[in-house]
Amino acid sequence: MIHRIGWACVTYQRGLSTNTTFRLQSLSPEKQIETALRNVDALEKISELMLEGGFRLFRIGQSLVPFASHPAVRDNPAFDWRAVLREPLAAIGEKFVPKGFRYSMHPAQFAVLNSPRPEVVKNTIAELSYSCEILEMMGLDTSHKLVVHGGAAYGDHDKALAQTAQVFHTLPDCLKDRIIFENDEHVFTLEQILALCEETGAPPVFDIFHHNLFPGNASSPDALTRLLQRVHALWRVDSRHGRPKVHLSSQMPDARIGKHSIMIDPPDTAQLCEALPFDADLMVEAKGKQDAAFEVQQQLLNAGCHIPPDA
């Protein structure tokens, strides 16, 4: 069964975004705070919209505080965004978490834990640390997660994942307690991500669209079921992880393979509903944002596969 349903970062055709940013050349303490306050205001308004529609899962944009992890900001005490944002972020957490909301963040593609370049790893950890700070300022427990990909393969998948695990083990607990690893559509399969998760103890987030594009040795329904049983086992190790998270997308017609469509194709929703052997929270990854999430919500309700939140 699917419990929480939600979407990422912005609304569709409603002008609300938690991801508003600007060019690095325009960076100043004043510009950063002005934009961050606009993003935080949008976060509250989107959460209100979700509350009205029965949605309780939201991914906060990585640019909530533009350039927060950039060296020009993190090494300069003039950029004191924490002092300004601590109170409004805490107020959002206090308002919406008791109503069943669950939030997350998802560092961008430049975040690569297993890079051979030390500066890339350093910047990745800085981005993760900033993301964790946002969730902590909101007063969120460790069921509110940071979604991370396995990294790059560099010609040797096993060695690359071993490097990701090695770096993971050096991270502070505040990051290790929140990171979840996602399978992708061209580098690491669900089975490979499971091996990483079993090594690190971090739970996996199952993306069924990515799995369909890149199943590896698990293209059959029975093979997927066996992998999903391992997914569930990793989430169940520690109740602080919360309910498993899964991602749902559809292919954009006549576009590059892997590009998300505006809405979700009903057969994709049905496939997820049939495949999942455990209860989960569902992130709808579609360009149509709240419109796509609403359609998926109705599809799941009609299929008897969704438990709506309490009012």
Image (cartoon, grey):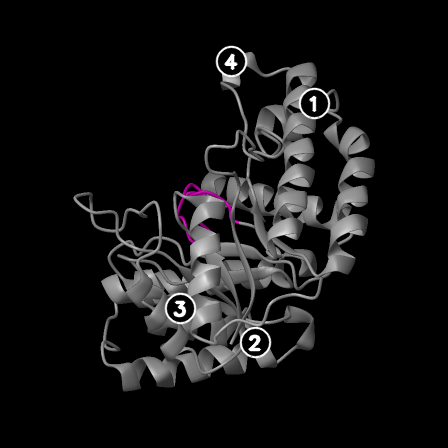
Q: Is 112 placed left or right of 98 in the picture?
A: left
Q: Amino acid at mark 3?
A: Ile
Q: Which residues, given as a range, are shown in magenta?
A: 106-117
The amino acid marked with disc number 1 is: Ile
Q: Marks 1 and 3, Cα distance to the nearest angstrom?
A: 37 Å
As drawn, 196 above or below 5: below
Quadrant holding the C terminus: bottom right
Residue at image coords 38%, 71%: 272
Q: Pick whichever of labels 4 and 1 is earlier in the sequence.
A: 4
Q: Mark 2 or mark 3, which has the lower sequence index?
A: 3
Instruction: Give percent across and percent down for residue 120.
Output: 46, 41
Main SS class of the magenta portion in the image: loop
* Dot 1 or dot 2, earlier in sequence: 1
Q: Quadrant of residue 64?
A: top right
Q: Secondary structure at mark 2?
A: helix
**Residue 271 seen:** yes
Camera-side residue: 60 or 79?
60
Which residue position is annotated with label 4?
A: 25
Tag 2–tag 3 contact (CB < 8 Å): no
**Residue beneath label 3, please?**
193
Q: Secondary structure at mark 4?
A: helix
Q: Is residue 111 magenta?
A: yes
Closer to the eye: label 1 or 3 = 1
Q: Is residue 85 magenta?
A: no
Q: Which residue is mark 1?
A: 33
